[in-house]
Each structure stands twice: as structure tokens, then as C-alpha cells.
Image: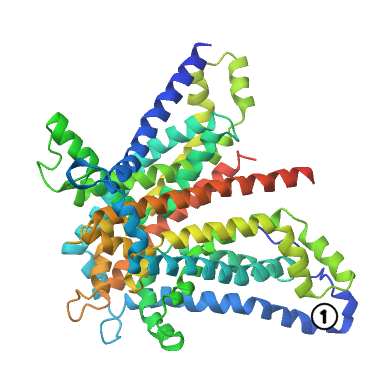
Amino acid sequence: MTAVAPISTKPGGPTRGGAAGRSSALSYLVAVPFLAFVGIFLVYPTILVLAGSFQDSNGAFTLGNLTDLTKGVYLQAFIRSVELSALTAVIGAVFGALLAWAVAVGKPEGLLRRVVVAASGVLAQFGGVPLAFAFLATVGFQGFVTQFLRDNVGIDLFAGSAWLFELPGLTLVYTFFQIPLMVIVFLPALDGLRPQWREATASLGGTSWTYWRHVGGPILVPPFLGALLLLFANAFSAYATAAALVSQGSPIVPLQIRGFLTGEVVLGQENLGKALGLGMVVIVSIAMGVNVLMQRRMSKWVR
Amino acid sequence: MGSVVKRRVLRTIILLVLGFYFVLPLFAMGEFSTRGVNDTRSFDSWTQIVSDPDLVDAILVSVELAITSSVLMLVLLVPTMAWIRLRLPKLQRLVEFLCLLPLAIPAIVLVVGMAPLYAWVNYFFGDSPLTLTFAYTILVLPFAYRAIDAGLSAIDLKTLAEAARSLGASWATVLWRVVVPNIRTALIGASLLSVALVLGEFTIASLLNFDTLQVQVNLLGKRNAGVSIAVSLLVLVFAFVLLFALSYVGQRRRQTVVEE
């Protein structure tokens, strides 16, 4: 995505010689609607959150909001969010990579691949609230599996606690969008492995193990780690599924922010929600930044 | 040969186990949403979808939003991106950065900054849920940008534009009759992704208090789980059909490129 051509070669410019200077100034006008829109609806809200994190309720500068993040319930929420995201990222990455491999060795334009990729897209990007209800239907108090186990096997899923609405439940639900996301982001890396490399290994006397240990494996490590970080960022930012499942209490950071938006605010802490937002942006940006670096390493090998 | 057999067995096991893992909840949704009284089957939950006026309204709102957001996205992105390739390569990096920025800012954080902004939006445009178009156009930017950028990279935009210009076409004609038809499939792809994303959006709508499909499904779940589960299944299946169709759109584009 580098610059397509130097600006000096203006198509259409030469036909109206005298207008060249004026038209280059005018040509910036075309970008104005886009820049104005993005400025108002993306940059402004972002700045509002970032700046608000450093202001007290009177608008004066303070670091109080940020120091509050390192204490009590807010720190716990961050720790739980990181734990949940890391755990589901690892589970998602491992099983997603296996599924991606199973699809990649099949026919490139086959039906199986189309179905898996389309279904992964749905679950990874648009699941949200429907996923929460899928879980209530499956392992909720009256869920299909819950009833089946209770009536036929004699196991009560909820004997211990209402785990579905706490961290273990969230972990289980999150794997349903983490595994599909891994399939989507890891499939191109697997497609980039050339069959010739495998044949070359074999012709030099290498086994399947030699191939994965010395050729395929090392090439796939950077994209795998990159995908792991993307999955982490994805779970960390996720809100809808958790919000639909957990209506009481705020175990993770996005639900803490919901509390600030829906009015459970202690006086004088209005900007704490923005500081929580800043904390999320920092963590997500680090994960995404390292992910970009990993992708650059991969692009040395693919294409 | 032993390793080929091993590979096939391993592949089958993975597909069966994970296939079961993902189909089970879908099956459970079907089972749950067709429960009647005393162990009978009934389609009440499904027929109630169309007889609940709030839900029908919310579905219509979401469909309208999907259309308005896709249109606004296309109107903002296509001329700007084409123009930047032709005349303003200096802005390329800035526009790319801005379009991908929403990936680094979770929707739940964006909505914190948008809440005060929407006080103004509702002052100027009224409090119609269609004002969500603005927020949703931002959300779909990264996906739409990538699709359109891939489309523009696949054609020789400069030559096409110069040819049209030398025949006396205005820039508007170039855009409408040369650029748009040539990246048609990329535009369809970007629009379908936007539609699917808007239909699935919950975070911003619910926290800005607008009744969209997902918000209604969530509310409904608190009093009638059956209907919510039926609608959820419907949404998932609809999104699947949309993306499955998209996989064929992408393939057609690759074929035309090869032909050229």
C-alpha cells in the first residue's frame, strides 16, 4: 500500500496548463468530507476519552483516575479480563490452528472450506448476543444439554454454582468466537506453505516430523504468535456476549465501563470510566502493534 | 504412505470433534425454540417473531441502518480512495491509519466518547435510531477499507482514468462510469460485510439506548427465552447465508483477474 505514483504525473493536468497550481490545492477538497466525518465521529470521541482520563470532574488535570485503576475492583477487573483473554486466546489459537489445518489440506474451492470459512466469519465477527442465547439454549438452566444430562445421566451441571454466568462460563462462550477467528486469520498462513517445500524435505530424506520441526513449524511461528495476540485483543475488547450473559456484577473491564455509562457512578468519579477505556486502548494497541510486527516477518516468506 | 493415512485420520477426527462442538449449540437452539407444553413440539416461538411489534420494528430499524451505513460508507470511501490513488498519494498513509484505527479502539471505549457527541447529534438530527448510521459507518471502516483497497489495487486505475479523461470525461464521469463498474465486486463485498456487521452490532446501540434488532433480542430474552433463541438462530443463519454468498463473489473476482 505504498504511494501509487508520484504526484507530478497528473492525469488530465496538462490539458489545462494554467490550472495546475489551482487544481492541486482544489484537489484536497475531495478528501474533506471523509476527513471531516472521521474527525467528528472517530478522532473527536477518541480524544474525548483520552483527555477525560486525565481530568477530574471539574476538568482540571489529574492522575487520580489512573492511580485508581491500580486499586481494588478496577485492578481486579483488569486482571480477570487479561486472564480471560489470555486463556481463551490460547485455547482458540490451538484448536483454531488445528481446524484451519484440517480445512487447508482439503480442496481449495471445496464446499467444506466454504462452509467452515463462512461459519467462522459469522461466529467470529457477528456472534455477539446470539452466541449468549445459543449458550442459554445449550447449557443454561433449562438448556438442551443440561436437561439431557439431568434426565438421562443424572448429572446436575449447576450443582456447584451458576458457573455459566461467571468466568468459567465466559471462557466457554468466548471459545465459540475465538476458535473461528483463529481459522480466519491463520488459514492464509497455512495456504502460504508451498507443497514444494514438503517435497524438497522428502527428497532429502526428511520425514513428516522433520518437515514440521525444521521447515513448516518455524515459518508458522510468527503468524501463530501474531494470531494469538489478535485473539487476545479480540477477547479483551468483546462486550456484547458478556453483557447479554452477565446482568449482575461487573467481573471484567467492559462490563465495568457499562456500569459507568448506565449511571452506577459515584460522585466525583465521572471520568474513571474514560480511564478504564484508556487502559483498554493501551492494552489492545500493544497487542495489535506486536501483531503487525509478526505479520511483517511472515510476509518475508509468503509471496 | 503411512503418514498420508495418519494425516487423513487426524483430519477426520479434528473435523468431527470440532464440528460436533459447533453444531451442538445450533441444534440446541432449534430444540429449545420449538419446545411446547408437556414435551410437545410447537412453533409458537417462531410465529411470535412476526407478531411482536417491537421486534418487527427493531428488525426494520436494523435493516434500514444496514442500508444507510453501507451507502454512507461507499459515498465517503470510494471517491476519496480513488482520488487519493490518482492525485493525492501523500494522504494515503493518513487515510489508511484513520480507517484502521477502529481496530485499536474497542466499541465499548468508542461509545464512552460518543455518548456526549450523540447529545449533539440528537439535537441536530432528532433522536431517530437512524442516527446510528454515523457510528456504524465508523465501525465498518476497517473492513470496507480493506475490501475496496484490494479492488482498487487489482485494476490499473491511472491508465483507465487517463484514457477516460483524454476522451473528455469529467472526474464525476470517471468515478461513476469507470471506477465503480471496475471495482464492482469489491464494492459488493464491502457492502455485504457492512450489512452483516451492522445487523450484529449490539454494544453501541444498547449503550446509546437505541432499539435495534440485537438490543430487542437481548431485552426479549429476559421475559421470553424461546423467542430470543429463535431470533438468534435466525440471525446466525442469515449472516451465514450472506457470508457464504460472499465467498462466491470473491471467487468471481479472482477468475476475472486471471482472464485479464
Query: Considering only vertical position in the picture, is A11 above or below A196?
Result: below
- The residue sitting at 63% across, 48% down in the picture is B250
Q: Residue at x 46, y 55 (%)?
A: A289
- Whether residue A74 is visible here, answered yes or no, is yes
Chain on which label 1 sits: A
| Horizontal and vertical percent position of residue B49 | 35, 59
Q: Is residue A168 above or below residue A111?
A: below
- Residue furthest to the left: A159
The amino acid pointed to by label 1 is Ala
Position of A11 with respect to A241 (left or right) is right
Taking depth in this image into account, of A80 and B241 the one nearest to the observer is B241
Percent coordinates x, y for residue B33 in the rendering:
29, 48
**Quadrant of the rendering where the C terminus of chain A is positioned:** top right
Horizontal and vertical percent position of residue A181: 43, 46
Residue at the location (51% across, 77% down)? A39
Q: Judge by depth and name the residue closer to the eye, B221 or A274.
A: B221
Q: Position of residue A111 (x, y in %)?
A: 55, 35
Assign the N terminus of chain A to one quadrant of the image: bottom right
Is residue A254 visible in the rendered structure shown here?
A: no
Q: Which residue is mark 1?
A: A20
Residue B211 sits in quarter: bottom left
Work out whether A303 lies above or below A18: above
Protein image colouring: rainbow
Q: How many marks?
A: 1
Q: Secondary structure at mark 1?
A: helix
Q: Dot 1 surroundings within 10 Å: few (below 14), some, or many (20 or more)?
A: some
| Left or right, residue A194 beside residue B86 | left
